[in-house]
Amino acid sequence: MRIKFLALAIAGALSQAAFACVPGSYSGNVLFGSTDSGVPDRVLDVSCTTVDGQIRDEDPWGNQAAFIAHVSSVTLAQQKAGQISAVERARLLIAARNSQIGSTLKVKLIAFNDFHGYIKPFEGSSSNPGVTRFSTRIKELKAQNPLHAVVSAGDMIGASPLTSALFKDEPTIEAMNRIGIDFNAVGNHEFDEGKDELLRMQHGGNHPTDAYSGLGMNEDLKGGEFAGAKFRFLAANVHDTATGSTVFPGYGVKDFLGNKVAFIGMTLEGTPSIVSPSGVAGLQFKDEADTVNALIPKLKAQGIESIVVLIHEGGFASGGINGCTGASGPIVDIVNRLDPEVDLVVSGHTHAAYNCLINNSAGQPVRVTSAGQYARNLSDIDLTIDTRTRDVIEVAANNLVTGTATAEDAALTDLVAHYDALSAVPKARVIGTITAAISRSQNVAGESALGDVIADAQLDATDDAGTGNAVVTFMNPGGIRADLPFNAPDGKVTYGDAFTVQPFGNSLVTVTLTGAQIRTLLETQFSGCNGQTATRILQVSRGFHYAYTAGNTCNARVTSMSLDGVAVDPSASYRVTVNSFLADGGDGFAVLKDGTQRLGGAVDTDAFEAYLQANPSGVAPGPQNRITKND
């Protein structure tokens, strides 16, 4: 009996299918969205084509007139073929108009920031998914809407691990070319090697002196050399002092079926304070909000109403990657001053992920996103545009985790494997041993175990008579980019590990400072004091101790300083070692530029390697007992 009933069911289904494909038959009316036209959705031929099947109401339309024109064209052909009547055609045109299809358009933006050349999975941290998994997630989002743009809010390159950095970050640019991103706003790290090198990243050509340049795969090269970025760098607030022009266009425009969206890109105004002087020589960095607001009339004069800001400046918030509790930081003030014509702000720089609404200059909430760092997340953003006014009427955003278990995109695995193989020998060279993983995480006073070790290594490299006679070293925390992992079973440290921790290639510089200048240096660690823009606790070498009270006023926070148990004398002179970035006033520590008897030294990674080799039994994590924070 079951077999008989099954046979009857199959026969019934086949009978219904045959009936459904009989020309003239129908099972419902033509719908445009949820609008019922009242016209039967008749089968037009034996291939099962229907009246509705020839009308592309599910497609995106740049305006309602375009959709109505499409319906008019299709239905006229159907009427001439005798498939619908004139009355039915009129009803279909009325329904098309009433459906409002084409009156709005949804555009998807896929945004990220602070990629920093992390193309290889798990390099630097097991949390880093790599560009192959990142690409998979981007492709998934692209597939959801053919109208899309992929954008970056800066620091795509610079401070990168060895797989990208060894090759002048060309691998990262080539990977982004393959992904097909549209715009990258410059960040501070894009200027690490100066304007000319950044221009090369855009326009291509091999580095004039570096033998590791131009070693990409044939498909990524142009004329046998590095091809440059196929996407556009944006730098609205960065001007060449010689010409007055911006080093890159201030904005880019992408057209979505006649609806233009402008992307204004820029870095933080404070870039010169956190990049070596050689990197920003001949450049002027202007106020972020003022720059955006000045461009609004120019964009509107072109008929552009939908405006997105890509800015390499950010803030902090709690509540997870989509949280916005207690939003703070420079981005809040910037957005508070923005022209209300700005529809969305994609931010970066702080490496924090958040999804916020922050009021603009008119007190209206603006969506502000950041996807964190190292491709670990990305921002999935939908803009709804009113096609009559060409303006954004709704913004929906969601930060998504890339995921370290996400499938790798086969379109990029060969590129990563290529550069990984080329860098394998220098990366795998063993330079020493540690007894345990050494973290850059700071304690309540701002001191890290890895900061202690790096400062000690720099002191060892410069404390002899011929290398500087240094008695103390200071290390900027922003120059420590990753933890130093313990590689089982014996804690061997590779050059790749060390480079990931300190990827900038700074050299050591020893100068003479008075005790009073050392106090000024330490007072300048705190946000708002002596021009400092953020709290940056310097890491110090063994033998030097100081205490501070955070609640005290500027230039009164440091309550004690001692060297080898003896109080630092304000009028005495001390030989002090820092890296070349700090020595030139980087991170706002301008007092270091006043140091005298300046003597150059080893590259920071070479000093670190020498320190590891001088301690063959293994270097232990630093004690984190050199800085005391008082309540």
Image (spheres, rainbow, N blue to C red):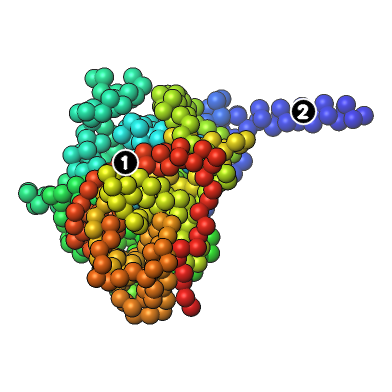
Mark 2 is surrounded, within 10 Å at the Cα level, by few (under 14), some (14 to 19) or many (20 or more) other residues, namely few
Looking at the picture, how far across and down is residue 336, in whole percent?
31, 70
Give the CA separation, mark 2 to mark 1.
78 Å
Q: Amino acid at mark 2?
A: Ile
* Image quadrant in which the N terminus is located: top right
Say if residue 179 shows up in the picture.
no
Q: Quadrant location of residue 491?
A: top right
Residue holding disc 1: 603
Looking at the picture, how far across and down is residue 431, in whole percent?
46, 34
Looking at the picture, how far across and down is residue 191, in whole percent?
25, 46
Q: Secondary structure at mark 1?
A: strand
**Residue drawn at x 35%, y 32% as measured from the top left:** 166
Residue holding disc 2: 10
**Residue drawn at x 53%, y 51% as measured from the top left:** 621
Above-or-below relation of 120 to 30: above
Above-or-below relation of 189 to 15: below
Identify the disc placed on residue 519: none
